[in-house]
Each structure stands twice: as C-alpha cells, then as structure tokens.
Amino acid sequence: MALPKVGSIGEYIREQRKQAKISLRQLSAAAGVSNPYLSQIERGLRKPSAEILNQIAKGLHISAQALYVQAGLIEHREADSDVVAAIRADTFITGRQRQVLIDIYESFRKENRAGAPAEDAQTSQNAQSRPEPGSDEENPLPESFTSTLEPFVAEDHFFGNGNATPRTKEG
C-alpha cells in the first residue's frame, strides 16, 4: 500500500498531526522535541534523525515504521492488505484509533500465519457454518483478548439494554 502522497517527511508529520487534531505545541510536548525544531521539520528545513522520528511517532500514536518509510530510512517491504489501506484512508477516526485497529488486525494475521497450513481447510469450513451462540466451540479470539473480556461474558450479567457489567463478589 502506498503511503499518502505528500512531498516530504515534514508534510507527512504535519498531516498526521492535523488528522490527530493536536497542535504543534501539543505534539512537541508529547514527543519531547522542541517546538521550533518540530516546526522546522514540518516546514522541510530540518531532516529528523531516526530517534527523533521515533519520538514523534510516539507523540502521534502512529507506527514509527511509517515515518521511517516516509523519511526514506527504510524500504516498505510487505504490501499492506486492502483492510489496512482502508483503515489508513479513513479520515473519520483518529490516528491512534487507526493504529489500534491495524495492530489488532495484524495480531490476527500473525496468529493465523503461525497455524495456517493445518487450519486452512478448517477455517474455510468454519466460515460457511457458524457455531450456535453459547456453544462450547473453540473461541476465535486470541487468549489475550478473551482473558480481558472474560469478566463481561457471563449471560447473567447482560441486561435488557445490551450493556454488560463485570462480575462482582455479590454476583
């Protein structure tokens, strides 16, 4: 997937900052980079080091790799999927929200790559027939997600409004 068409790393950083709806001063404080230096980077007067790009990426809550690629420090190796391209193109969510969605999607892809050959036939079969709600079939979510969600899944904790509450000692 090609990154947005901008002329320089500074323009790219400015665009990401504007999409995140934060001021130059806010990004400066979050990244630990001086306001004048960050302004010079955005205007194309300075070329930031990899370390500064990493700090800016953290301040913007985006992938440092995206900034490294845009700055020409590394080559973009693997083409992004259409899903990642769609997430990155969505201007109705923040940069941080885009990155979280991409991270979740990539974690699913990584998990599936690890067990892909043995599970390919089963995955296509499961896609055609979905398990009944409440069945004991294997949970499709990674264990790290299910352990986080576990307090909310008991049926007796769902109310008429569809909201869930965590389990308590009182029940």
Image: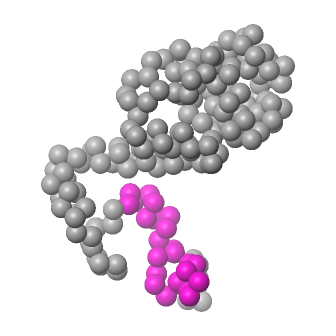
Describe the colour scheme in one phrase: one colour
Closer-to-camera residue (7/30): 7
Quadrant for the N terminus in the image: top left
Q: Can residue 59 be seen in the rendering of this structure?
A: no
Question: How many numbered badges does the structure rendering display?
Answer: 0
Q: Position of residue 166 (x, y in %)?
A: 57, 77
In the displayed structure image, the side of residue 63 where residue 109 appears, left or right: left
Classify residue 78 as left or right of residue 27.
left
Give the left or right position of residue 105, taking residue 125 as reference. Answer: right
Quadrant into which the C terminus falls: bottom right
Question: Residue 4: percent from the left, percent from the top?
Answer: 56, 28
Percent position of residue 164, x then y: 56, 78
The answer to which of 127 and 148 lies nearer the viewer is 127
Give yes or no for residue 160 being in the magenta stretch: yes
Q: Which corner quadrant of the image does residue 61 belong to? A: top right
Residue placed at 51% from the left, 44% from the top? 87
Name which quarter of the figure residue 126 lies in. Answer: bottom left
Does the magenta portion include 145?
Answer: yes
In the rendered image, residue 32, in percent from the top left (x then y), is placed at 76, 29
Depth check: 68 or 128 in front? 128
The residue shown at (44%, 57%) is: 144
**Residue at horizontal 27 percent and vertical 44 percent from the top:** 114
Residue 72 visible from this viewpoint: yes
* Residue at image coords 49%, 68%: 149
Up the image or down, 94 lies above or below 165; here it is above
Q: Which residues are magenta?
A: 141-164
